[in-house]
Amino acid sequence: MDTLSSDTIAFLEKIKGKKIVFTNGCFDILHLGHVEYLNEARTLGDALIIGLNSDLSVKALKGDDRPINNENDRKEMLLNLRAVDCVQIFSEETPLEIIKLIKPNILVKGGDWKPEQIVGSDFVLKNGGEVKSLLFKNGYSTSHLIEAVQGKK
């Protein structure tokens, strides 16, 4: 079972009483779709926390050829985006356990997810929070980028 890092615990203490927005993903190769989505997510609250799939969970979700970038590099890239306040790596199949530990006020995913499909939506709604499906920028995908680089697209 995942636990929160000391950085995440300290950040949560620092922002106690503020509106927390949470999202999750692999964020293997950052692209404009990610940046616009994270910028939109950040406008919904006082802080944006990202649950980042560990290398092992990316491999389980995406296959043996992934991730392209390791979890520490992906975390640092995300932390260097203005919209992102905190990144918590998780190794479970889903971020449900860390969502329960963080207790976000708003849970978001990209527009290709319906709110009821978003992992943790029941928990967040039950605790008085909101669940939103945000902008999905067509034509932007890490998988498509990888295919293009490999000359498959």
Image (cartoon, rainbow, N blue to C red):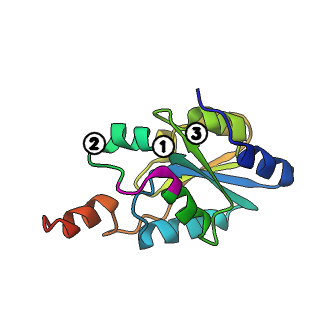
Q: CA distance from mark 1 to mark 3?
A: 21 Å
Give the percent coordinates (x, y) of residue 18: 82, 55
Residue with the mark numbered 3? 121
Residue with the mark numbered 1? 54
30 with respect to 148 (left or right): right
Marks 3 and 1: in contact by CB < 8 Å? Answer: no
Circle number at residue 63: 2
Q: CA distance from mark 3 to mark 2?
A: 26 Å
Give the percent coordinates (x, y) of residue 112: 40, 54
35 with respect to 86 (left or right): left
Q: In the rendered image of this protein, does residue 36 appear above or below residue 11? A: below
Q: Residue at x 40, y 69 (%)?
A: 137
At label 3, the amino acid type is: Ser
For the record, the magenta segment spans 68-72
At label 2, the amino acid type is: Gly
Q: In the rendered image of this protein, does residue 47 appear above or below residue 62? A: below
How many discs mark residues in the rendered view?
3
Q: Is residue 70 magenta?
A: yes
Q: CA distance from mark 1 to mark 2?
A: 13 Å
Q: Earlier in the sequence, mark 1 or mark 3?
A: 1
Q: Residue furthest top?
A: 1
Give the percent coordinates (x, y) of residue 116: 50, 40
- 147 vs 69, nearest the viewer: 69
6 with respect to 74 (left or right): right
Q: Is label 1 or label 3 in front?
A: 1
Disc 2 secondary structure class: loop
Give the percent coordinates (x, y) of residue 91: 50, 36
- 63 vs 40, nearest the viewer: 63
Disc 1 secondary structure class: loop
Q: Main secondary structure of the magenta part?
A: loop
At label 1, the amino acid type is: Ser
